[in-house]
Amino acid sequence: MDTIAIPALNRPVDATVEIPGSKSLTNRALLVAALAQGDSILENALFSEDSEYFAKCLEQLSIPITLNPNLAQIQVAGRGGDIPAKQADLFVGLSGTTARFISALVALGNGEYRLDGVPRMRERPMGDMLTVLQTGGATVNFEGNSGFMPYTLYSQGFAGGNFRLKANQTSQQLSALLMIAPYAQQDTIFEVEGTLVSQSYIKMTCRLMADFGVEVIQISDNQFQIKAGQCYQARHYTVEPDASNASYFFAAAAVTGGRVRVKHLTKQSCQGDILWLNVLEQMGCQIKDSDDYTEVTGPKQLQGIDIDMNDISDLVQTLGAIAPFASSPITIRNVEHIRYKETDRIKAVVTELRRLGVEVEEFADRLKIEPGPITPAAIETYHDHRMAMAFAVTGLKVPGIVIKDPGCTAKTFPDYFTRFFQMLEQ
């Protein structure tokens, strides 16, 4: 297995960086562009394993798509809600957005579509969304456990109507349903039972739908209405830099007491993970925001916090990786749903922090990390891109940190370590 040794810095980092486009926005834009009528061009699109799986699925559905990685540009010839291919065998890798968004997309078609992914993807929940699609007219045949991949979806269009679903493990299923609902045969209302996790991603979905000309009416915190007969408008769309992936560079400023500026990303971002700036501010960092960049300056000593990270749960690993350097304990709450991600992320963070000699308490939906000295170690990444990227930041403060399987960052940020080391050289 490949490894990368992280060089500890004996000085504050001082750098200006550019981050590739958002994975979450790229895959949402790919879906709505495929449903629009006419050609859309996505600028600053992310080219990574996740987005490439999505693009490949669109190609297999006979939706024309042109990739230009040198320009970070994707052109999609939308078919106005039509799914040209009547049969396809679709592989999604470990991409949760691709799995859920493509499953919803093919429900609008009239055909037979088999979907599968890597073994871990077969463990990730799909059932609530599939139940809605079945009620709306699809038939789903599961090859293994009900509610999980692999399965074949037989579709004849989506009827729409009123639906109740749970969204306590992932918000991606609701996002997928919202994005196809304009092409339903009647108006659609989705009511979420219980707690809706990662609400910021639902807001992102609704904002992107509006950018392409479709209105979502939010009746209440847990109720969403989409009128039938709306159509996405093909357009030129620029994808924001990925706020989740920017978090690691901002964290580098925080732990070294340095300064990092991320270009073209501001507090006005539609991505919920821009709230990472608020977390760093609570920990003592200074934030400078302009029309075309955000800059973080770290303090002499990070402060501990007690924080609910339900809405920004992709950043749990980032906070976990810098928590030992705080002046007091850090408690991360309300994140049980991250146990169903690329890996069980609570367990993974706890295991690797303990490997580093850090005292950590693990609970079903939270963890508490004590400050203290770190023992050098090789970090297991569990095929999880965020484990590799987050714990690289730990290595800036402690000599001897090695990241195993650094190539796993290809899922959302293929050249992460190239840009990370470029930051250190400035």
Image: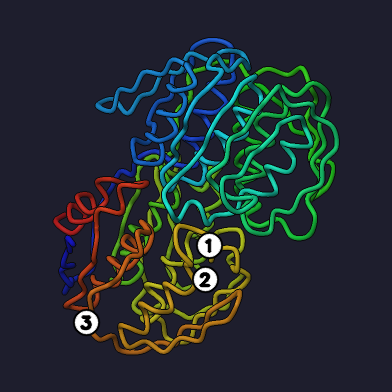
Image coordinates of residue 142 in percent, x first then y, are 61, 44
Q: Give the SS element for disc 1.
A: helix
- Marker disc for residue 350: none
Relative to 367, is 294 above or below?
Answer: above
- Marker disc for residue 282: 2
**Residue drawn where x is 43% and y is 24% of the image:** 42
- Marker disc for residue 376: 3
Residue where numbered disc 1 is placed: 278
Q: Quadrant of the C terminus?
A: bottom left
Q: Give the SS element for disc 3.
A: loop
Label 1 crowd (10 A; few <14 / some 14-19 / many >=20): some
| Residue type at numbered disc 2 | Gln
Judge by depth and name the residue closer to the eye, 133 or 7: 133
Q: Gap between marks 3 and 2, in whole Å? A: 28 Å
Label 2 crowd (10 A; few <14 / some 14-19 / many >=20): some
Circles 1 and 2, Cβ within 8 Å, touching? The answer is yes
Q: Nearer the viewer, mark 1 or mark 3?
A: 3
| Residue type at numbered disc 3 | Pro
Q: Gap between marks 1 and 2, in whole Å? A: 6 Å
Q: What is the quadrant of residue 111 in the picture?
A: top right
Tell me if residue 249 can be seen: yes
* Circle nearer the N terminus (1, 3): 1
**Residue drawn where x is 48% and y is 13% of the image:** 77
Q: Gap between marks 1 and 3, in whole Å? A: 30 Å
Tell me if residue 268 can be seen: no
